[in-house]
Image (spheres, helix red, strand yellow):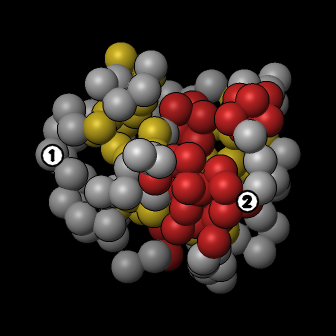
């Protein structure tokens, strides 16, 4: 049976090896946040987990900057088709992460990679302006 992650790779026509090269690039900015923490994941290796209770539509953090750098959140957020977070893009290709439902403290924050790759959402506001 093909996993949802493998379907996403097929959708964008790249191999697991190519995705690993992209994911493990040197363009990582390690960030610290009061919203999430990095720790061992039951999904895959390392993940990011809520450091506090998060509410639906709450801004969690920046996952990428100018389509050049990933942050801790962007690098370690794992894929799930039962996501509780979503990526949004700004006009200058920063990647922002918002909760799509309430997330309890110590719950892994996960995004559906297929959603943001196949249906990217561009927002025209800064994170602190989003309601």
Q: Report x, y in % for residue 8.
A: 59, 56
User: Considering only vertical position in the picture, is 103 above or below 41?
Assistant: below
Tell whether 61 sits left or right of 17.
left
The part of the image, by quadrant, that contains residue 38 is top left
Q: Report x, y in % for residue 81.
A: 37, 57
Q: Mark 2 points at which residue?
A: 12
Q: Report x, y in % for residue 16.
A: 68, 35
Mark 1 or 2, closer to the camera:
2
Q: Residue at x 52, y 32 (%)?
A: 76
Task: Decide which of 128, 18 is in the foreground and name it.
Answer: 18
Quadrant in which the C terminus is drawn: bottom left
User: Considering only vertical position in the picture, is 65 above or below 42?
Assistant: below
Q: Mark 1 falls on what kind of element?
A: loop
Q: How many numbered discs, if any?
A: 2
Tell whether 12 sits left or right of 129.
right
Q: How far apart are marks 1 and 2 (CA)?
A: 32 Å
Q: Residues within 10 Å of mark 2 (few under 14, many from 20)?
A: few
Tell which circle, 1 or 2, labels the residue nearer the N-terminal end: 2
User: Considering only vertical position in the picture, is 13 above or below 39?
Assistant: below
Q: Mark 1 points at which residue?
A: 104
Q: Mark 2 falls on what kind of element?
A: helix
Tell whether 31 sits left or right of 101.
right
Task: Decide which of 11, 74 is in the foreground and name it.
Answer: 11
Q: Report x, y in % for residue 2.
A: 47, 48
Q: Residues within 10 Å of mark 1 (few under 14, many from 20)?
A: some
For the residues labelled 1 and 2, say whether their Cβ atoms are less than 8 Å apart.
no
The part of the image, by quadrant, that contains residue 92 is bottom right
């Amino acid at each position: 049976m093909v996993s949802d992650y493998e379907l996403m790779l097929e959708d964008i026509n790249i191999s697991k090896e190519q995705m690993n090269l992209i994911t493990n690039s040197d363009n990582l900015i390690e960030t610290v946040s009061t919203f999430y923490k990095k720790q061992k994941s039951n999904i895959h290796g390392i993940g990011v987990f809520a450091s506090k209770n998060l509410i639906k539509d709450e801004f969690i953090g920046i996952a990428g900057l100018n389509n050049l750098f990933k942050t801790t959140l962007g690098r370690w957020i794992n894929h799930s088709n039962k996501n509780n977070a979503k990526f949004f893009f700004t006009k200058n290709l920063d990647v922002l992460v918002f909760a799509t439902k309430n997330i309890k403290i110590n719950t892994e924050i996960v995004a559906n990679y297929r959603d943001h790759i196949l249906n990217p959402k561009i927002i025209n506001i800064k994170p602190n302006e989003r309601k």
